[in-house]
Image (cartoon, rainbow, N blue to C red):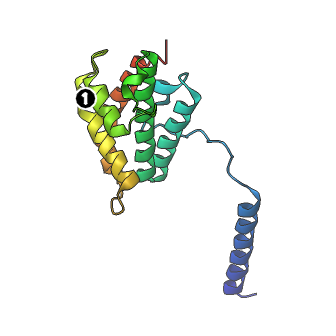
Amino acid sequence: MKPSDAIRSSMQVALELKRTIDENIKPPSAIAASRDEPVIYMALVNGTRGYIERVAHQANGCYAQGWYDASAVMLRRLLETLIIECYEAHKIADRIKDSTGNYFFLRDLVDHLLAEPAWTLGRNVKTVLPKLKELGDKSAHSRRFNAHREDLDKVLDALRDTVQELVSLAQLRR
């Protein structure tokens, strides 16, 4: 057998093995834990609510894979959830609902959170919330925008402050 034939044969075996693995080994049906914490420190959300922890894992996992739009959308979802949790914890959720009882869209949630007299937000949180919302909106809704790592990196420090502050305001950890 010539060396080129041996290589061709090895490549065919490798391709068949990959095909067999892909057909038989599926990812878990539930969300897998992220391996790293490049976006959200899990210590900030562990012990809060399972759905909050899972969204944080997804934001981290997407970032680690280079799926920056997906990570930004997960961050948007996390912020939306934490804002609602804040209002529910203080029993003032009706302040962020429309006349039919549905929660406002994120734009209005952020505006209400920033103006809410029931609490005082830190300077970093006030500054970054609109930026995080804009990044998440562009990643979710803009046909031509694709987030880059640097887009997320610009807000990571302030994101950490924001998540910690909202978790505290929502009284999710004692």
Bin the neighbour count of mark 1 within 10 Å (Cα to Cα): few under 14, some 14-19, many 20 and up: some
From the top left corner, tell me how far across and down residue 9 is, in percent. 73, 80
From the top left corner, tell me how far across and down residue 109 is, in percent. 35, 33
From the top left corner, tell me how far across and down residue 30 is, in percent. 66, 42
Q: For the N terminus, give its image quadrant.
A: bottom right
Looking at the image, which residue sits at the far top?
174
Query: How many tags in the picture?
Result: 1
From the top left corner, tell me how far across and down residue 63 is, in percent. 45, 47
Q: Quadrant of residue 156?
A: top left
Q: Quadrant of residue 4?
A: bottom right
Residue bearing the label numbered 1: 126
Image point (27%, 16%), residue name: 117
Q: Is residue 151 above or below residue 46?
A: below
Q: Is residue 15 above or below residue 76?
A: below
- Work out whether residue 11 or residue 152 is closer to the camera in this orientation and state it: 152
Image point (45%, 33%), residue name: 100
Image point (70%, 66%), residue name: 18
Instruction: Give the amino acid at mark 1.
Output: Lys
Q: Is residue 161 above or below residue 140?
A: above
Looking at the image, which residue sits at the far bottom?
2
Q: Is residue 146 visible?
A: yes
Q: Is residue 3 above or below residue 19?
A: below
Q: Position of 34 compared to 26: left or right?
A: left
Q: Position of 84 compared to 155: left or right?
A: right
Q: Quadrant of residue 127?
A: top left
Q: Is residue 167 visible?
A: no
Image point (22%, 25%), residue name: 123
- Work out whether residue 6 or residue 66 is closer to the camera in this orientation and state it: 66
Secondary structure of residue under mark 1: helix
